[in-house]
Amino acid sequence: MKKILIVATVQSHVAQFHEAIIKEMQKNGYEVHVAAKNNLSEKNGLSLDYVDVIYDIPFERSPFNTKNVQAYKQLKRIVDKNDFAIVQCNTPVGGILTRLACRKKRRDGTKVIYTAHGFHFYNGASKKNWLIYYPIEKIFARMTDVLITINLEDYALAKKKFKCKTEHLYGVGVSDNKYYIHSSQEIESFQSRYNINNEDFNIICIGELNDNKNQIVLIKAVQSMIDTCPHLKVFFAGNGPNEEALKEEINKLQLNNYFTFLGYTRELEYIIPACDCIVSCSKREGLGLNVIEGLLCGKPAIVSNNRGHRELIQEDINGFIFNVGSSLDCAHFLKRIYENKELHEKLSNNARASVKKYTLDQVIKKQKEIYLMQGE
């Protein structure tokens, strides 16, 4: 039986983004192994029980953390011991260490696929990011059989600058059987289940609570709106290192009645339909998976201006784009759809059709073709 190894910094990444392709490869006769740090206890029941073999590797997110030396040694032993037909790697640390570990095995026929979920260098990125990450990716492209990008800006750059086969996928695929436009009766049921008041304007903001996701912008946007838009409620779905700091800021601004922290939840398919719009304030996105989920549910999106969001949002068609870090811009667009029911309805009606090409069936079909071609 042919074997494939999937590597990422943390196991939750694999569980969230790779379940469908893992099961497709198993259907096609592959034994699937996963190597990543076990962080599933933090993720409220997320599991990898469908994977054939799992290796707990102590990766650290920073490429410069010395603990990654031990992680590399463990990974190399796994790669050397097994005859993997394909090794697929993700995330900066997983991508670097895996391609280093596979140099000898590539000469023996193992194919290495790297999926870039968003380069750290891009139009508008800092000079520091370009000086550090661009040369690294250019060098490591030579150790890559196929580079997969999930947004068109990264694809154009990689195609032009890197010496390896480059493919583009429309994200990692979102199930339109889970995320769809529900009936009013279903929505009322979801609202009742999660104590969401139908009379409020309910905002969902999804993602790890960290500096990049930049949730502080939404908190300050709400602060500037409450006098004119009092019936606002924000639901933060996710956990992360900034949770306590965000709660302290909300408390300091006396906004506790406007915010609910849901923690990490696997019930977004019910919570998103119960809300009125989705907001993402990220400084950087490869492609906003949560935004796609919201749009598939018919929810307008108010998002920050980055390449991953620009690819999804058509202004005044399915949402609006505000300047990164600008709480006033964010508040301006939220207020527009809060006050204008006709505009909200128009954006909602356009939302689902605008992201059909990002659905799971479309993406997995091409992804499987890429993998199987390499595994021949």
Image (cartoon, rainbow, N blue to C red):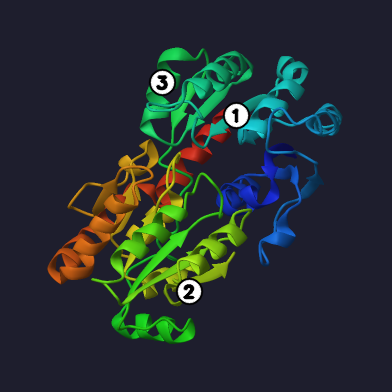
Q: Residue 211, which numbered label?
A: none
Residue 108 drawn at (x, y percent): 75, 17
Reading the image, the residue beneath label 3 is 157
**In the picture, which quadrant includes the N terminus?**
top right
- Disc 3 is placed on an element classified as helix
Contact check, label 1 and label 3, Cβ < 8 Å: no
Q: Residue drawn 45% across and 41% down?
A: 285
The CA span between labels 2 and 3 is: 44 Å
Is 108 displayed left or right of 310 in the figure?
right
Crowding at mark 2 (Cα within 10 Å: few <14, some 14-19, many 20+): some
Q: Residue drawn 72% across and 52% down?
A: 51
Front residue of this view, candidates 261 and 166: 261
**In the picture, which quadrant includes the C terminus?**
top right
> Label 1 is placed on what type of residue?
Ile
The CA span between labels 1 and 2 is: 46 Å
> Label 3 is placed on what type of residue?
Leu
- Disc 1 is placed on an element classified as strand
> Label 2 is placed on what type of residue?
Asn
Residue 193 drawn at (x, y percent): 48, 85
- Disc 2 is placed on an element classified as helix
Q: Is residue 87 visible?
A: no
Front residue of this view, candidates 274 and 230: 230
Q: Residue 113, which numbered label?
A: 1
Crowding at mark 1 (Cα within 10 Å: few <14, some 14-19, many 20+): many
